[in-house]
Amino acid sequence: MQTVDVIIPTYKPDISLFSLIEDLEKQSHSPEHIIIVNTEEKYWNELKEKSGVDITEKFDNIILRHVTKEQFDHGATRNLGVSLSNAEFFLMMTQDAFPRDKVLISSLVKSFDSDSAAAYARQYPKTDCNLAERYSRKFNYPNEPMKKTQKDVGRLGIKTYFCSNVCAMYKREVYDKIGGFINKTIFNEDMVYAGTACQKGYAIMYVPEAGVIHSHNYTYMQQFHRNFDLGVSQTDHPEIFGAIKSETEGKKMVRQTIEHFKNIGKPYLIPDYVIMCGFRWLGYKLGRNYKMLPKKLAISFSMNKEYWK
């Protein structure tokens, strides 16, 4: 059986992290190790005190490392986690994503072909997920599996490089050849990696049989900040995003979501959704042009403020 480690960056974890770890330990394809790279040790200690549980004592395959908030980076922190792994595959997850069943890991492992660099899971909405976000899950995570290569750019556009570290598995051999995640990045380290892999002749697999529960009900400003950072990441990596139109898919999703609201008899949701999309678009456009902004203003627009220090 091929070896798999799970890597989870954490920040201010709560008791739900223990549920995630329990779910991972019960997988039909058991992980060799669960590697946790936690930002700010004090928050980990607070969780231990509040819960009365030391999860690292309960399971002997957990590896825990702490970094400071200043040291955290979306790419470098994940690279640190990988450096602690000797497995053939590693599964990147976030602390707020939960396996839908016991075959998450096995489904991802089985999907790899000889030219596959990464495979990402389908995301299902939480029970409290709003209808707009719920529909976006259907748009971004369809029923059909996909194998995406550089040849698909003309057909799929930016979706060719879509890959989400909410739950994505990587082949270590390919990771080492590519050079890992970019060490300094504001956001979007997964798509930068996927784009690099495709350009080097590898494939990205979408595996709907592998499912996680994960969604957010972002506010207007949270959408603004998140999409500002998305725009910054694309501007910082023209080698990946420069020749691909990224707004076409966004417009398509907006049109389909509005039509969906009409079809389910809830057109009253459209105005709020349009406003939300306006915040997304404005954040993205400002991020794409962040080099024209004063640094203080860019920092105020950003979700990841530590990146600018």
Image (cartoon, rainbow, N blue to C red):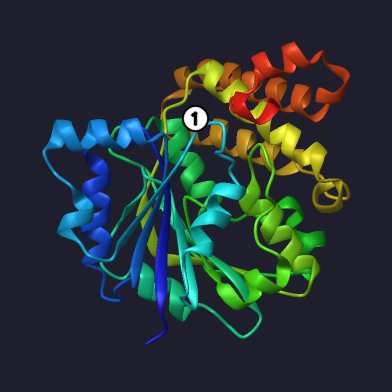
Q: Nearer the viewer, residue 275 or 30?
A: 30
As drawn, 188 above or below 274: below
Please state, as top left, top right, bottom left or bottom right, where the C terminus lies in the image. top right
Residue 58: x and y in percent read 15, 57
Horizontal placement of 195 versus 126: left or right? right
Residue 278: x and y in percent read 65, 19
Crowdedness near tag 1: few (<14), some (14–19) or many (≥20) residues, C-alpha within 10 Å? some
Q: Quadrant of residue 45?
A: top left
Q: Nearer the viewer, residue 156 or 113?
A: 113
Please state, as top left, top right, bottom left or bottom right, where the N terminus lies in the image. bottom left
Res 160 seen here: no
Residue 301: x and y in percent read 66, 17
Name of the residue lying farthest toward the left? 52
As drawn, 86 above or below 125: below
Q: Quadrant of residue 115?
A: bottom right
As drawn, 83 above or below 36: below
Residue at image coords 27%, 51%:
20
Secondary-structure class at tag 1: helix
Residue 84: x and y in percent read 47, 64
Horizontal placement of 148 versus 256: left or right? right
Res 219 seen here: yes
Horizontal placement of 153 versus 271: left or right? right
Q: For the image shown, how many numbered marks are present on the structure?
A: 1
Q: Which residue is mark 1?
A: 262
Residue at image coords 46%, 35%:
133
Q: Amino acid at mark 1?
A: Lys
Horizontal placement of 129 versus 290: left or right? left
